[in-house]
Amino acid sequence: MMLDRRSLPQSLVVVCAIGLTLLSGCSTPLREFVDNGFKVGPDYRRPPVPLANQWIDSDHEGVNTSSVNYSDWWTVFEDPVLDGLIVTAYQQNVNLRVAATRVLEARAQKGIAVGSLFPQSQSIDGSFTRSQLSKNVAVPSPVSHFSTWSATFGASWEIDFWGKIRRIVESTDDVVDASVDDYDNVMVTLIGDVASTYVTYRILQQQLLYVQQNITLQESTLKIATERWKSGQTNELGTVQANSLLEQLRATQPTIETGIRVSQNQLCLLLGMPPTDLAEMLGTAPIPESPPEVLVGIPADLIRRRPDLRAAERYIAAQNAQIGVAEADFYPQFFISGDIGYQAKDLDLLFGPRSGIGQITPGFSWNVLNYGRIVNNVRLQEFKTQELVAVYQQKVLVAAREVENGIIDYVNSKVTAERLEASVAAAERAVKLATDQFNAGVIDFTSVFVAEQFLVQQQNLLAQAQGDVALALITVYRSLGGGWQLRLSDPAIATVGMIETVPATSVVVEAPELITTE
């Protein structure tokens, strides 16, 4: 049924005019309302971020400020075992699947919000009524019994005059973007954890190798010391010292083996599998060797690359839209309700040409005398937005600190490892000289004991220092936000990180919009 324009109540026109007049006295001026696309509330603007122009150690010879693609930063170690572990983790990690599901949840929530732009309620109703009139009415009716059949379609639509529903859609759209960034952040963390755990495993493996080599060496030394003592060439002191060092080495071995098993169990968790002995799969290999330079770009790259910063910025945008949602309550809500259908006393006449019925009801609703609550709700949303801006800026500061810490750790760890390599080489030479002199009977075993004890200590420190270089490099690239691009770089890989019930295209979306500083 078409609505004749002349049938519109004059009060609706008056209310609309009053509402537009109120715009000049509320948070959103009329000009801004028009510029915002007929939506109350402020349009979002990215907040400024506190970032330096360069890293503190950008001039160091081991630091390169070139900007590169960090999508596969772990390949700088040239370790195929590590490459395979990361791909497997992407395929099977449970936390990553949880994050993927949250993306779908956010998209479903957006779909609900978009649906509110259209008639919010629609229903098809049908009924049959059998009625009997009282025989004691004032004017007796010749028909005391009759039936009524009806079938109607009704709808109610709140017109989004002030942009409230569009602001809700805008907010949910930003939440979808943030959920994708949260997914990427889980991936960055996952890749960094896999790489760090793998390096830790190789450190412990190298330390165990040193211990086993020294146990073999010390067993041989103990045998010589015992034979010389029994033959009367030396006293018992050398034998006791050799045996003490041997038992010390043997006591160290179980501790290292425990660390190896713990690292394996952690890798299993990251790979999404129950604890399994991975020794055969991982094999034996040296500690991953780092390249001579670390590529760090410039600080401004952080807010474009780090997904946790992008997510924090998107949550600000989502909350900013809620200001407009709250402000819309200042103004009247306009809606149209109506239904069309058929009604007849007999079923065979229900859909006849004379059985049509219908009505349309334009109206409005205005929460007057509630301005104290509405004003404070607007303020609440504004304060929440300001809070998220501060949270975002703090996250940027923390991110910059993490990169700076990683850079200086990488630079100094390389120096430490180089000096320990020289120390170990000298310690090995000292052990050989002392052993040769002991076997020749020139010195007693005390010098051998001291030299071998120092060698064991330095070898253990060297393995840790070499691993620290790799761990520092991992920290730098993780802090720079590298690795999430894996879901974009290779479609064959990008599809395997989703749970079976989730189509790959649901999460493998186009790259998020780059964020620029202001």
Image: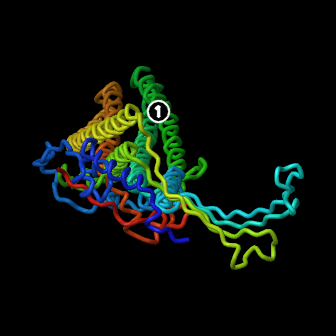
Q: Which residue is mark 1?
A: 252
Instruction: Report x, y in % for residue 134.
Output: 87, 51
Q: Is residue 143 above or below residue 196?
A: below
Snapshot quadrant of residue 291: bottom left
Residue found at x 89% / y 52%:
135
The residue under label 1 is which amino acid type?
Thr
What colouring does the structure picture have? Answer: rainbow
Depth order, front residue of 308/161: 161
Instruction: Report x, y in % for residue 241.
Output: 41, 24
Inspect this view and state whether residue 501 appears. Answer: no
Instruction: Report x, y in % for residue 263.
Output: 49, 44
Inspect this view and state whether residue 245 appears. Answer: yes
Q: Is residue 350 above or below residue 514?
A: below
* Quarter of the N terminus within the rendering: bottom right
Snapshot quadrant of residue 464: top left
Instruction: Report x, y in % for residue 485.
Output: 36, 61
Residue found at x 51% / y 65%:
496
Residue found at x 54% / y 59%:
337
Depth order, front residue of 113/424: 113
Depth order, front residue of 64/218: 64
Q: Is residue 197 left or right of residue 465?
A: right
Residue extending furthest front?
A: 139
Residue extending furthest left?
A: 59
